[in-house]
Amino acid sequence: MELLTDQTIDQRLESLLAQLSLEEKVRLLTGRDFWTTWPVEKIGLRRMLFSDGPTGVRGEVWDERQPSMNFPSATAISSSWDPAMADRLGAASAVEARRKGVDVVLGPTINLHRSPLGGRHFEAFSEDPVLTAELAAAYVAGVQRNGVGATPKHYVANDSETDRFTVDVKVGDRALRELYLLAFEKAIVDSKAWLVMSAYNSVNGATATENVLLESPLNTEWGFDGVVISDWTAVRSVESAKHSQDLVMPGPDGPWGSALVLAVKCGTVSEAAVDRKVLRILQLAARVGALEGFEPVAAEPVDREDPVAFAREASVAGTVMVKNDGVLPLAPGSVTSVAVIGHNARHARTQGGGSATVVPERIVTPLDGIREAFGPENVSYNVGAVVQEGIAELPLEQLTNPVTGGPGLRVRFFASTGKELFAEDRRSTALVWFGGDAPIAESSMVQFHTHYTPEETGTIRLGFSTVGHGRIFVDGVLAHEASIEATGTDLGAAFLAPPSASVSLAVTAGVPLEVTVELDLAGRSGALGNALAVTIGLEADNTDPEELINDAVEAAKAAHVAVVVVGTNSRVESEGYDRTTLELPGLQDRLVHAVAAANPRTVVVVNSGSPVLLPWRDEVAATLIGYFGGQEFGTALADILTGAAEPGGRLPTTWPATQEDVPVINTTPDANGELAYTEGIHIGYRAWLKAGTEPAYEFGHGLGYTDWTLDAAKAPGADTSAITVPGAVVPLTVTLSNTGTRRGKQVVQVYAERPGSVVDRPVRWLVASAPVWAEPGETLTAAIDVPTRLLAYWDNGWTYEPGGYRLRIGTSVSDLPLETVLTLTDATQTDSNQDGAA
């Protein structure tokens, strides 16, 4: 195929555009269905398939029979402080996408951790815009190098979930530019993202899909030439077609369609605006190989690695050890017994709730990993405290499909006449239909049928979780009937985390029950009318919580070391709602207090996607923050516990000691639907420093298994000629030494301070960082580029204040033993373009 120049490509795309009628062009601007775009055979355009995918790519269907890799959460990836790790995640995600026929991955999520209560923070990187920007740009580069489109989201200031469809974020120009837009900029300017997703919320009075920010800075300053795709159902009117919003999802219905055709014919929307949108969609199709006659960016993935091995390595790299009194690492030969305690040790959270969810083929839990590392005969297990809320799916090994005789269940969809419309055999009782072949909209009822064999004699609570009316039959007899209504107004939360109903049943170990659940589907409508989510299973047994804690304490007393895994669940951290408390759910804090008192060699593993309170942190021997560690969470944890690998993470977000200490916490709009970012440029560690309050663990903190010294730092400008601004990059050199006895990792962090500034500044702010590795006894010099753009402030352009800037260098925002002064002279310029973008 001939090598096409950019000019030739543009000309050929224009020629294809000319072949389309107005109606055909407008049809291309709304999705064909939930996940795909319209094909146009006469111009050689096939459909394009989109998929959720910040840390895994689900594909067109949400189906356990088509499993996906479950990589560690974005907070784990960001804790590596390693753009190379984010790049590898992007490349691995693109390989997964190509395997599933996906053209566009809907990620990365790069909104900032403004408040620790944000329910979706596990899916985003950090509270800092510079760290976020570096990681986001690397992820985008990795995805697109392998020929798949990446979609930075959600543009912009979509930093919490409460009333996310209607909230109007009031944010000043400086904070918007220096924080929230800065997080996106590098992925556009440097990595040339092929798409950007517009958000649900409004910004300063205009919805994100009808906001001038879609044009400037995105197009005019940053040179974005890709597709602005809406968050699902975010476009609400034809008015948005006048703005730089290109593609409405999902389809086939939406606010554009025939209304937009009419608006063009009436002259209220120009056809040139429609043409620009279509050309961008055609260009995206050319890039991903969906348009005949154009060479895709990569016909096959050019960068592959073993995804399971990568998931394990990424989990290790993102695990943060915030405390260690010397108990870790544990040499397996020296440990006679391990008491593993905690609900999350056996039922680990490997990912948060919501649209980012994928269905992995297998999960290695902490209990699995520890048993493998130390020998099952040396490991005991106690639940200690129940974390589960609502219904947990039934284990596949306890289910028999009554039709096939194999593991699983039969699902059947019926018309109102009783005629069976569709049937399929499934291997999970936690089921979601987004698209696919199931005729949900045409069905009156869906039936789930299986034989369930309990493992233990006793009482269970069998139930279902969904929105609607359902019935539970046991051995052919109606056992329970209930109607479940959604709580709150968020469609995503109502769909993916609905309430549950259950019934108490006496069961005998080994004696199967015939279980049939029927759900009425008639009358479903709205945006999710052709989608369905339901979980059939058991509610947790928490009838005697004190006994659970006492049993765990006795196990800890008898063990050489106790490993307690505490954490959250998908009801606590999920798309669709924010948290109301940073406390661990249930009685987990009481459990840790009790276990630590019983065994001084207590190691706590925190299995949450974002900060939680750790009131027992001074009582335990060691604390590891493993986040939602992906499907290899257990193997990675075992690697760290045994010393086969060291925890490589540093905190990308401040962890508070108490909720009352958090300086920026509000996520709830006022009575007018407005959420005011009154803190301005002071979020995260910046706000903590301004308040003068000490958190439990500061931004950038993390320990390893070796010791380091930071020896020297030098930057030109301290004693040499002036630095040219704007757009300059200052090469900083930092010399450091591994003074310990084993190979290790350190993250060198560079912060700027500007005493006596003419404008409000943070006490200090991150301007650069670099992960480094060294052998024992090795001294190395890290070369770290500091963009002077990050020293500027926004005042209708990037404004450079002349004078001295103190660069503080160290290993966290408060551990900064080195410093040098960078002097900017002749720095009164204002730079309003993208040169020198961070």
Image: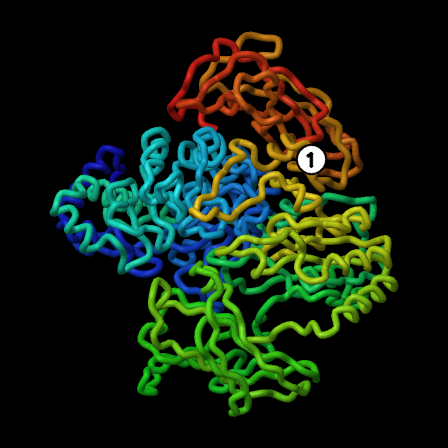
Which residue sits furthest front? 671
Q: Which residue appears at 62% of the width and 26% of the height?
A: 763
Q: Is residue 158 visible?
A: yes
Number of marks drawn: 1
In the rendered image, the vertical position of residue 41 relative to residue 825, given as above or below = below
The residue closer to the viewer here, 783 or 133, is 133
> SS class of the residue under badge 1?
loop
Spot occupied by residue 615 in the image (x, y as percentages of width and height): 75, 50
The residue closer to the viewer here, 710 or 148, is 710
Left or right: 645 as drawn, with respect to 108 = right
Q: Which residue appears at 42% of the width and 50% of the height?
A: 106
State how the image is colored. Answer: rainbow
Spot occupied by residue 786 in the image (x, y as percentages of width and height): 55, 23
Please tell me in which quadrant of the rendered image residue 761 appears: top right
Circle 1 Cα neighbour tier, 10 Å, few/some/many (<14 / 14–19 / ≥20): some
Quarter of the image where the N terminus is located: top left
Spot occupied by residue 607 in the image (x, y as percentages of width and height): 65, 55
Spot occupied by residue 727 in the image (x, y as percentages of width and height): 45, 20
Left or right: 654 as drawn, with respect to 59 = right
Q: Amino acid at mark 1?
A: Thr
In the rendered image, the vertical position of residue 752 relative to residue 560, given as above or below = above
The residue closer to the viewer here, 341 or 402, is 341
Left or right: 393 as drawn, with respect to 556 = left
Q: Which residue appears at 50% of the width and 86% of the height?
A: 402
Can you identify the residue that label 1 sits on?
A: 693
Q: Is residue 13 visible?
A: no
